[in-house]
Image (cartoon, rainbow, N blue to C red):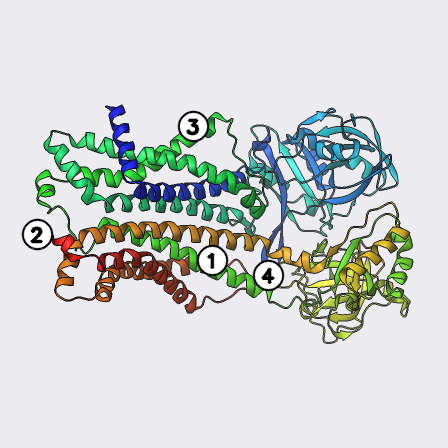
Amino acid sequence: MLKNYIKIAFRNLFRNKGFSFINIIGLAIGMASAILILLWVQNEISYDRFHEKNSRLYEIWENNLHDGALQTGLNTQQLIGPALKNDYPEIENTTRVSWQMSLLFGYGDKQVKATGIWVDPSFLTMFSFPLLKGDVKTALNDPYSLVITEKMAKKLFGDSDPLGKLVKFDNSENFKISGVLKDLPNNSQFDFEFLESSAFLESKKYIDADWTDVSIMTFVLLKPNTTLADVNSKIKNIVLKYSGGRAKDEPFLYPMSQLRLYSNFVDGKPNGGRIDTVRLFALIAVFILFIACINFMNLSTARSEKRAKEVGIRKVAGALKKSLVAQFLIESIIISAIAGILALIIVQLSLPSFNLLTQKQLYIDYTSFYFWLISIGFVLFTGLLAGSYPAFFLSNFRPVAVLKGSFKKVNALVTPRKILVVSQFTFAIILVISTLIIVQQIKYAQERNAGYDKKNLAYVFIEGDIPKNYQLIKNELINSGTAIAVSQTMAPLTQSWSSGMSLNWQGKDPNTRPTFDRSTTDGGIVKTAGLELVAGRDIDINTYPTDSTACIINESAAKLMNFKNPIGQLVFDDPINWHVVGVIKDFILQSPYDKTRPMIFKGPKYGSNVMNIKFNNNYTTAQNLASTEKILKKYNPAYPFEYHFIDEEYAKKFSDQQLIGTLAGLFAGLTIFISCLGLFGLATYMAESRVKEVGVRKILGASVSNIAALLSKDFVTLVVISIFIASPIAWYFMKHWLMSFDYRIQINWYVFVLAGITAVIIALITVSFQAIKAAIANPVTSLRSE
C-alpha cells in the first residue's frame, strides 16, 4: 500500500510540473530561511555552555547606587577575587581576567601583533579551553610563562613545536611558551590569542590595590552543592569592608550561562538583553516556516476541483477516508523531503554570505547523528503541517456533491484559505513596518551630532619606543605637513576605558555617587578632535606648567557639579585635586543611542595609551598614511604600523542594530515573496471557481477591466484587513523596542501607510496575471458544458 501511495504521489508531481515546482520552491525557501535563523539562534544560546564546570561558573557583577537608582556593571576591583577565595569556603576558585590588549611578540626575525588577556593561573582549570601542549595546572604558574593558541603558534613558529621556546614580549621581556591552546570556539565570549599570567604583573607591582578602582572582570567557581543566594548574601559587603567604607559597591555572582543573553539590568535586577533579539528571530523562523506551509495549503486547495473528482470516484470505488488522508499526507511529506534537500543546498550556498553578514562562523555538521535525526523530524513536521489541511479538506468531499459539481462554496465570506492569506500578509506587513522603523532609528542616531570632527582623524596605540620619542614624532608629523594637530589620550575618542564614582567637588551632595567617564590628555585635544569649547581653554602644558593637574569637563559634568563658573574649580579624584581650565560641549563617547554621561579629561599627570592624529586635508589619505608610516618606522622600528580611523570606529557603534535591521528586511522580503506565492495560489483557485461566472458576465457585456477589478477586489480586501491587524501589533512591539534607547525616534503614521500601500501594490501585481487571464478567456470554452 505504501509503495502504491508513493507511486501515485510521484505521478501527481510529474503530471502537474508547474504546481509542483511552485510548491517545492516556496517550501524550500521557507525551510532554508528557518534553518539559517535557527543556526544563528543555536549559536547564540550555546555561548560558553561547553565548559565542563559551567553550572558552577559565575562572574562577579557589582551594584552601586547612582542618583537614587542601582547601576549594575561587570567591572570589579583587582583584589576582590583573591579576597573572596580567602574569606569564603564556599568558593572553590577565582580568576581575574583583564580586558583585551594588543602586544608585539618576536621570535627570531618574525614579529607578530596579537591580542590577549592576563589571567590568574586558575583560569585554565576553571574553564574548558583544552591545551594541546602543556599542563593546565602549571602552565601559567611562572611569571614569565605564556600560553598561546594554535593560530598564534602557526604565525610565530610555523610547523615546529613551540613548547619551551622563548619569545620577546612587547620588545622588552623574554617569555617562555608553556602551553598551546586549541583555537577558541566561535561561541565563547572570550577572544584571545595569548594568555599572560597575573604572576608577572604581581612581580612588577602592577596589581592595583585600590578598592575604589574597578578595571577588570572576575570569575568564580563555586563548590558543588553550594546555594547561590547564600553566597550572594555573604559577599555583598566585602568591598565596603576592604575599602574602609570608601567604596559602597555590592558584588554578586551571576551565572556564566546567562552572561551572553541576559546582560541588561534595571535597578540591580536582570531585565532581558540579547535574549530579546534571539527570541524575536526564533519567532520569525517559526512564522516563515508556517507561512511556507500556508503557501503549500493554498496551492494544494487551489487544485481542489481537479482533485475532487478523483476523490469522488475513489470513494465510490470503496476508498476509506483514512486511506485518502494517508495518500495526501504522503504526497505532502515527499514534497517536503524534496524541498528539504533543496533547502540544504540553498543554506550551504548562502552560509558564506550569511556568516559575513552576522560576523559568525556558522556551519552544518553533516557527520552528526543528531543533525540527521533533527532534519528528518523537521521534514516530517513540515510535511505534516503543510499537508494536514489539504489532506482533511480533500478527503472530506462527499462523492455525490463532487460528481454533481456542488461541493464548493465560492462566495463564502470567511474561508480557511482567506484566513491563512490574511495571516501571511499580517506577518509580512509587521516585518515591513518593523524594518522601516529600525532603519529610521539607525538613521536618526547616525545623524546625531557626534560633537567632534571625525574627518581625517586617526589614532595609533602608544607602544614600543613611541613614549620616549613622542615629542619628536609629533613635531615631525606637524612640520612635514602630514598632520595639523597631534595629542595623546587614555583611550580612543570612541571608547571609554575608565569610569568612576569617586570624584568629589565643593558642594557635592554626599548622598549621590554619579558615574563619570574619565580620560587623560597631554593637551591640544580640543584642536585635534575638533571639540567645541563653551568656556575656558584647552590644556597647554608648554604655556601653563601647572596644567599637569589641569582638567577639562563636558557640559553634562558642569551641569551636574552645579558650578556658576566652572573655570578654576577643583575636582578631586583620588589622590589629586584637578583644576578646571575648560568646558567642552558634550560629545558622543559611547553609544549614540544613549544620553551623554559626565566626562573629565585629566592633564598629563598620568600616562596615555593613544596618539590621536588630525591629518592635513591638503593631502590624500594615502599620502598622509605613507608619511606617518615612514615617521613611525623611523622612531619605532620594531613595531608594525597600525592605524584606526575614528569615523570607521564610530560607524561600528551601529553594527548591532544594523544587523537586526538587515536581517529583518531580508526575511521580510522572503516572507512577502512566499506570501505572494500563496496569494497566487488563491488567485488560481478563485479563477477556477468562478470561471463560469466570468463567462456569463462577459456574454452579458462586462469588460475585461471590470472583470479583472471584480476578481482583484477580493484579494485587496484581504490585504487591507491584514494591514489593519498588523499595524497595531507592529506599533506595540516597536514601541517596546524603542524604549531601550534614550535617544530615539517617534513612530510616525506614514510608516504604516507606506507599508500598507506597498503591500497592496505587491498583491495587485501578484493577482493581476490570473485576474487578466480569467477576464480575457473565451466564454464559449467555460460555458460549453452548459
Q: Is residue 339 above or below residue 705?
A: above
Q: Secondary structure at mark 1?
A: helix
Picture disc at residue 373: 3
Circle 4 residue: 594
Picture disc at residue 786: 2
Picture disc at residue 435: 1
Whichever of callouts 3 and 2 sits on the residue coming sooner in the sequence is: 3
Residue 698 occupies which quadrant of the picture? bottom left
Q: Residues within 10 Å of mark 3 (few under 14, many from 20)?
A: few
Q: Is residue 212 left or right of residue 608?
A: left
Q: Is residue 205 left or right of residue 510?
A: right
Whichever of callouts 4 and 2 sits on the residue coming sooner in the sequence is: 4
Whichever of callouts 3 and 4 sits on the residue coming sooner in the sequence is: 3
Split into 4 quadrants, where in the image is the N terminus?
top left
Q: Is residue 660 above or below residue 614?
A: above
Q: Position of residue 738 (x, y in %)?
A: 50, 60
Q: Secondary structure at mark 2?
A: loop
Q: Residues within 10 Å of mark 4 (few under 14, many from 20)?
A: some
Q: CA distance from mark 4 to mark 2?
A: 72 Å
Q: Position of residue 259 (x, y in %)?
A: 58, 42
Q: CA distance from mark 1 to mark 2?
A: 52 Å
Q: Is residue 572 above or below residue 346?
A: below
